Each structure stands twice: as C-alpha cells, then as structure tokens.
C-alpha cells in the first residue's frame, strides 16, 4: 500500500490506527488466498489526507469468496462516537445473484437481491483508524458477459450514531458482530425499523459478550445456540447453523464466519459522512474490466466460489388411508429429493476455483424448519411425529435434519384447504419450510489451508399424492 514516504500510513494490522476485529486482524496473507483488487492509495497519500471517494483498498480471498474492504478514516474527520453503516448494491441494466449470500442464513436461489446494508461493531477513533468490512460473494457466471458502466456494484459507507440497539427483543447496549439486512435503497433505511436480519460473528468472543447480557432463559438459549454452532464449526461438525465459512488462515486462530438470522432494531441517525466512500466499482471478470473508465480491478477473475442458480426441488409425498369416523383418515408424508436432480449435483462452481483447488466432501442435508407437530385435541387433532433423522436448534429455529417421514393423524386434503382455523392449517405439512444445507471443502492445490463452506437454500416443493396404503 503506497503512501507518502515522509508521513507513512501504517497498515491496518499494525499500530494504534488498527482496531480491526481481533478475530480477523491477522488474516490478510497472500499465502492464505488473499489478492489485492482495489486500491486508492498512491505515493502522495498521507494520514491526514481527505481524498474524494475515500482512502481504501480491498482484498479478495479466492478460496473463500470473501471480499474485504479496508477503509482508512483520517484523524479528526468524524466524531469519535460514530459507527459505520456500509453495504454493496447493484446498478445498471442487469440483474445478478452475486449478492444473494448476504441476504440471510438461508438463500432463495430463484431471487436476486439488489443490495444490502451492514453495521460493524467498530467505533471510529478520533485519532484516525481503519475499518474492515467483509462481503461474501456468490458466483455468477454471467458477470463475464457484462460491461462497466452498464453494470457494476456500488460500495456505500456512511457514519451513524446508534442510540439504541435491540437484538431478539432485548436491549444489548452495544453491537457484537455484524448485522446485515437486504435493502434496495439508502443503507440508512435499516435504522429505526424492527426487521429480521443476519447476525455475523467472526469468532466466539462477541457471543460471550452477549451471553453476559442475556436476561431470560430464551435469550440465553439463543446465544448458547450460536456459541455451540461456532464450537461445532471448529470441530468439523455441520450442526446448529445454516451458513458459514471456516478455516483457510495460517494465523494462530482458525477463521470462522457464522451467520444467524434474528430480529434486530437499530435506533439512530445518520451523521456527516465526509471523507467516506460512495464508489461505483468495475467488477473483476467483466468484459471491459481492464479498460473501463473507473477503478481498474487488479485481480481480474470473476469472484465467488459457488452458487445454485435455481431453487432445488423436493418431493413431498403424501399417503392417505380413509376411515369412516367423521371423514377423518390417517396420513403420512415423506420428503425426498428427486434422485435424478440432487441439489449437490446442481452446484455451479467458479471455473477459477476448480483450476486452483479441489472440491471434496460434498454433503447435503434436508432440513424441515419449525414444523407445527400438534394443533387441536380429540377428533379434530392434526398431530404429526417425526421418524428418523436428528434435531437441531439453529438460533431461534427448530430444525429436523434428514427425517425419513412425518407420520400422523390428518384430515382430508380438501378439508384442510377449507378449514377455518389458521392454527390448524399450520399443522399441515404443505405449509412447512423446507431447505437443503450443502457443505463442502475447498482444498487449495498450492498447500494453503483447507476451507469449509456451508450454504443453505430454500427448496421448491412438488406435492405428490401417492396411492393409498395401509401403515
């Protein structure tokens, strides 16, 4: 990173102007897959300089699909109490799924989110400091067919004063981890609105800080669930989470990036954002990326490791046996993937990752989220039991993993469609959320550390009425 030899700016991981999250501060080495993408520094840059567009550089990890911006805040330019709101958004005449992995713990493969906003747990130092901002990029094979400025990404950063922070129904006083919420407009739109958002941790320290503020057993259970998920990640167990990256760093601490969905409310106001960035960026891999009129990316391979471009299918097979009692009948549901169209076989990998690494240990799990297993009692009962598989708590979600079947006592198909009690309808397996969790290892061919990637996608269900049988 060039700067004025007479007044050098320290690197973000060195000296008092650091302040980067301790879980990631040592994770920047080229040997671990980091490549320089963008850089606005030059030989005249000094620590006090306020440069149009901001002073920043960005690294991309080619084994993790992670884009990390390092923004330098010159001394005295912003109040010390401020925090940073930041995010990426698409602009131009094309749509893309490249930002979908920042939409939450579970991805909708049939949608394309246009942008998202984040807030860090870092505050600004009056003496100047660095802010690190991570974005996970989904692979989009169409990027090579686009050109700048007809299409690209915009990187926004603004300062805010957070006056109150409510997480999962509880005031916490401070932000631990990074909060992410999809947005199609100004990134400050996430302020003063109660919404469901993603909570990302780079390690267990932020979770332990929250545990100390938990007041109810439900809150303690939520934070313990996150802590347990991180422990599982580090031990190689794919349990207790939907979306994660782990490993890949040669530093002493193993790198973890865990996403959890929860309810958040940020109360605050935007402040003067002088000296921060509002950049329109040329994307690596675009058809004119090396000649476009903009900040030329120094790394020029399309970003992202993997994606599912279409929602995978699940077959929801229902079996019925009629009886004479009030028209009721027993029912059984089986959920299974179409063996000719398995989700893990439809993963689209970036050709660049296949050139530099091997993909191993691909695994997929069928997830049934928060099913209502019992409604009323007596003759009107709709009670289901789960056979086979395992049970997990993922944040606030109750999840059945790889169940063989859901047998139970049900009403007729048509009767459910017309039933007047909403609570009864929720016991109908046709209303349950189904997803697939896919995990795999990225093994770099140059000997760099292994990376494990976990992604969960909502399923597109096809209901199949099976022949009546006795069971």
Image: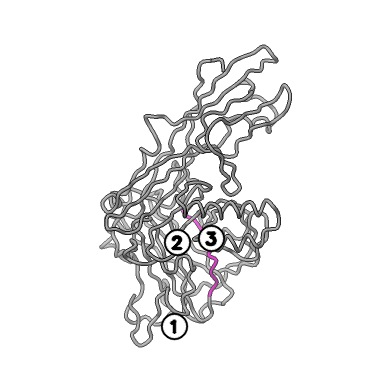
Does 192 sit left or right of 243 as displayed?
right
Is there CB contact under 8 Å for labels 2 and 1?
Answer: no
Number of numbered discs visible in the structure rendering: 3
Query: What is the quadrant of residue 284 in the picture?
Result: bottom left
- Does residue 13 belong to the magenta stretch? no
Q: Depth check: 22 or 199 in front?
A: 22
Does 209 sit left or right of 37 as displayed?
right
- Please report the residue visible at 60 percent of the width from the left and 64 percent of the height from the top: 209
Question: Which residue corresponds to mark 2?
Answer: 134
Q: CA distance from mark 3 to mark 2?
A: 17 Å
Q: Which residues are magenta?
A: 115-124
Q: Position of residue 436 (x, y in %)?
A: 47, 39
- Please report the residue visible at 65 percent of the width from the left and 28 percent of the height from the top: 383
Upstream in the sequence, badge 2 or badge 1? 1
- Does residue 118 belong to the magenta stretch? yes
Q: CA distance from mark 2 to mark 1?
A: 25 Å
Does 396 sit left or right of 347 as displayed?
right
Question: Which residue corresponds to mark 3?
Answer: 204
Query: What is the quadrant of residue 419 in the picture?
Result: top right
Upstream in the sequence, badge 3 or badge 1? 1
In the picture as drawn, the residue positioned furthest to the right comes out as 378
Question: Which residue corresponds to mark 1?
Answer: 48
Magenta stretch secondary structure, dominant: strand
């Amino acid at each position: 990173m060039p700067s004025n030899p007479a007044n050098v700016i320290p690197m973000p991981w060195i000296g008092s102007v650091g302040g980067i999250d301790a879980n990631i501060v040592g994770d920047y080495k080229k040997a671990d897959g980091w490549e320089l993408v963008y850089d606005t520094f030059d030989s005249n840059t000094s620590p006090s300089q306020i440069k149009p567009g901001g002073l920043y550089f960005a690294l991309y990890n080619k084994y993790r699909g992670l884009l990390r911006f390092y923004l330098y805040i010159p001394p005295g330019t912003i109040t010390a109490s401020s925090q940073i709101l930041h995010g990426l958004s698409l602009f131009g005449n094309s749509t893309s799924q490249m930002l979908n992995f920042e939409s939450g713990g579970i991805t909708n493969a049939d949608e394309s989110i246009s942008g998202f906003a984040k807030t860090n747990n870092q505050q600004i130092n009056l003496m100047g400091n660095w802010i690190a901002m991570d974005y996970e990029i989904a692979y989009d094979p169409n990027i090579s067919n686009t050109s700048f400025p007809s299409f690209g990404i915009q990187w926004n950063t603004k300062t805010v004063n957070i006056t109150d922070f409510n997480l999962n129904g509880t005031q916490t006083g401070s932000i631990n981890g990074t909060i992410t919420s999809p947005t199609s407009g100004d990134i400050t739109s996430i302020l003063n609105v109660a919404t469901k958002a993603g909570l990302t941790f780079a390690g267990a320290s932020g979770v332990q800080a929250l545990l100390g503020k938990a007041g109810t057993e439900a809150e303690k259970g939520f934070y313990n669930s996150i802590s347990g998920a991180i422990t599982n990640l580090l031990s190689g167990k794919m349990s207790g989470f939907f979306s994660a990256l782990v490993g890949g760093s040669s530093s002493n601490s193993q790198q973890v990036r865990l996403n959890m969905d929860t309810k958040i409310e940020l109360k605050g106001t935007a402040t003067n954002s002088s000296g921060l960035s509002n950049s329109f960026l040329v994307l690596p891999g675009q058809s004119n990326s090396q000649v476009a009129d903009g900040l030329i990316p120094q790394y020029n391979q399309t970003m992202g490791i993997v994606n599912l471009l279409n929602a995978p299918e699940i077959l929801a097979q229902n079996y019925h046996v009629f009886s004479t009692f009030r028209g009721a009948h027993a029912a059984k549901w089986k959920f299974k993937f179409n063996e000719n169209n398995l989700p893990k076989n439809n993963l689209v990998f970036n050709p660049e990752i296949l050139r530099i690494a091997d993909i191993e240990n691909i695994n997929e799990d069928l997830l049934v989220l928060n099913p209502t297993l019992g409604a009323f009692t007596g003759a009107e009962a709709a009670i289901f039991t789960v056979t086979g598989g395992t049970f997990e708590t993922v944040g606030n979600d109750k999840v059945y993993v790889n169940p063989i079947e859901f047998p139970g006592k049900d009403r007729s198909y048509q009767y459910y469609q017309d039933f007047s009690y909403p609570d009864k309808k929720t016991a109908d397996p046709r209303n349950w959320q189904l997803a697939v969790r896919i995990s795999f290892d990225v093994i770099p061919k140059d000997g760099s550390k292994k990376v494990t990637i976990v992604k969960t996608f909502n399923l597109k269900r096809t209901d199949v009425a099976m022949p009546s049988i006795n069971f």
